Amino acid sequence: MALKTFVKISNVNNLSDARYCAGMYVNLLGFSLEEQDEYYVPPTQFKEITDWLSGLQYVAEFKTSHPDNILNTLKQYAHFDLIQIEEFAHLQMLYHTNYPLIYKAEIDSDKDLDTLINLSPTFREHNILLNLETNMGYGLSPSHIGLLKDLASRCEVLLGFGFDENNVEKVISETRVKGISMRGGHEIKPGIKDFDELADILEVLEVED
């Protein structure tokens, strides 16, 4: 089994999500390592989850932490493959670590995409994976598709909005992004997890045997 495109799942904080995603051959699982975040995963819980998994790469997700604190935090964990941050100013301070970088950018307007297009030489030079998300219901008009396609031609992009199980393959084809990103969430109770929407999209992306 495999997926038709590259997939990252963020905010993983329970074994149900993690095992399901591993079974669907997701590429990256992201874990929040900031204690104030509602999805925070402490070192012991991270080990308990990942001891059950194989074949994935793990992303340490940070929002505002200073790079010094990021690197100190990572010493407490068994293993991470990549670092995701949201502060552009912190990228330069992490260029020369052993960790590949993901920059998460919130997209609320065309201007945000224009800004990222202008910054794309930096992302490409340092092999930074761009993860685009939104909290504003930003849609995908033809002009948005064009901007995303332009950006994806300049650096590697994961798209985290504007698709569902009905159009995800079309959106990936039209924008030519590297792949998509989605978010996990809290269990209803231990062992029970409502991830219907996430599962619907992943099942569409399954490669048929």
Image (cartoon, rainbow, N blue to C red):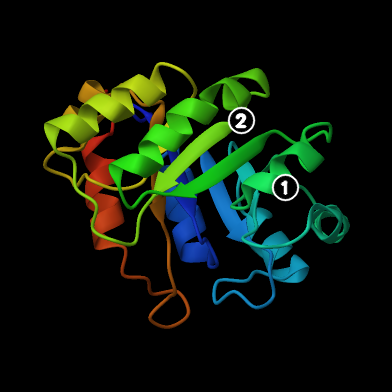
Image coords of residue 191 (percent x, y): 45, 74
Please name the residue that numbered disc 2 is placed on: 128
* Left or right: residue 143 compared with residue 21: left
Amino acid type of the residue that numbered disc 2 sits on in the rendered structure: Ile
Give the residue at the far bottom of this rendering: 189
Q: Amino acid at mark 1?
A: His
Q: Is residue 91 left or right of residue 182?
A: right
Q: Is residue 54 visible?
A: no
Q: Residue at x 73, y 62 (%)?
A: 65
Determine which quarter of the picture holds residue 202: top left
Residue 45 image position (x, y, % from top left): 69, 69
Please state the horizontal and vertical placement of residue 150, each as a whole percent of the image.
34, 20
Residue 48 seen by the camera:
yes
Q: CA distance from mark 1 to mark 2?
A: 13 Å
Residue 149 pos. (x, y %)? 30, 22
Quarter of image, res 7? top left
Residue at (14, 38) in percent of width and height: 141
Q: How many marks?
A: 2
Q: Which residue is mark 1?
A: 90
Quadrant of the rendering where the N terminus is positioned: top left
Q: Is residue 150 above or below residue 23?
A: above
